Image (cartoon, rainbow, N blue to C red):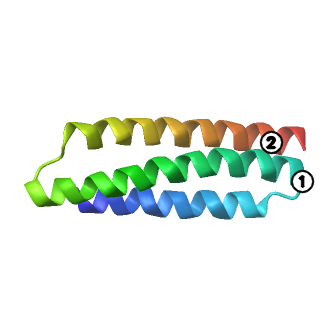
Amino acid sequence: MQTQHLAHKHKLSTMLETVHGMQDIRARSELFKIYKNCSNVYTEMDREMVNCRRTNKVTPKYTELEAKYVESITIFEQWTVLAALMF
């Protein structure tokens, strides 16, 4: 449970590096908006992880947030490819 949560955090930092690596300011701006959304979902997941650790099991809310986070990452990756092709 903890290792997967830390892997999500590492993915978030990798995404920020991707945003900073973009050359075009328009692409960077759009990707940063999507990154910010992913970051907000991760923050909610982090708060829910406290409840998971307290109860020693994964809560349904955490599972929902994790699915939303994975979907957000997929969208970010799609936009990264699109931005690389357009700009």
Q: Are the residues tagged 2 and 1 within 8 Å (C-beta)?
A: yes
Please identify the quadrant where the N terminus is shown: bottom left
Say which label, 2 or 1, has the lower sequence index.
1
Q: Is residue 25 above or below residue 72?
A: below
Say which residue label 2 marks.
83
The residue at 21%/36% (across/down) is: 60
The three-letter amino acid code for the residue at tag 2 is Ala
Residue visible at 66% across and 64% down in the picture: 17
Amino acid on which disc 1 is placed:
Asp
Q: Residue at x 61, y 56 (%)?
A: 15
Q: Sort mark 2 into few (<14), some (14-19) or many (20+) by Cα contacts within 10 Å.
A: some
Identify the mark at residue 45; answer none if there is no mark.
none
In the picture provided, is 33 more to the left or to the right than 84?
A: left
Residue at the left extreme? 55
Q: In the displayed structure, would residue 47 be above or below residue 27?
A: below
Q: Quadrant of residue 54?
A: bottom left
Q: Is residue 29 above or below residue 20?
A: above
- Taking the image as shown, residue 10 lies to the left or right of residue 22, namely left
Residue at image mark 1: 24
Image x and y of residue 18, in percent: 69, 58
| Front residue of 53 and 76 | 53
Report x, y in % for residue 76: 63, 42
Q: Secondary structure at mark 1?
A: loop
Which percent across, then down, holds residue 45? Answer: 36, 51
- Circle 2 — which element? helix
Going 49% across and 35% down the picture, which residue do you hit? 71
Graded by Cα atoms within 10 Å as few (under 14), some (14 to 19) or many (20 or more), the crowding at tag 1 reads few
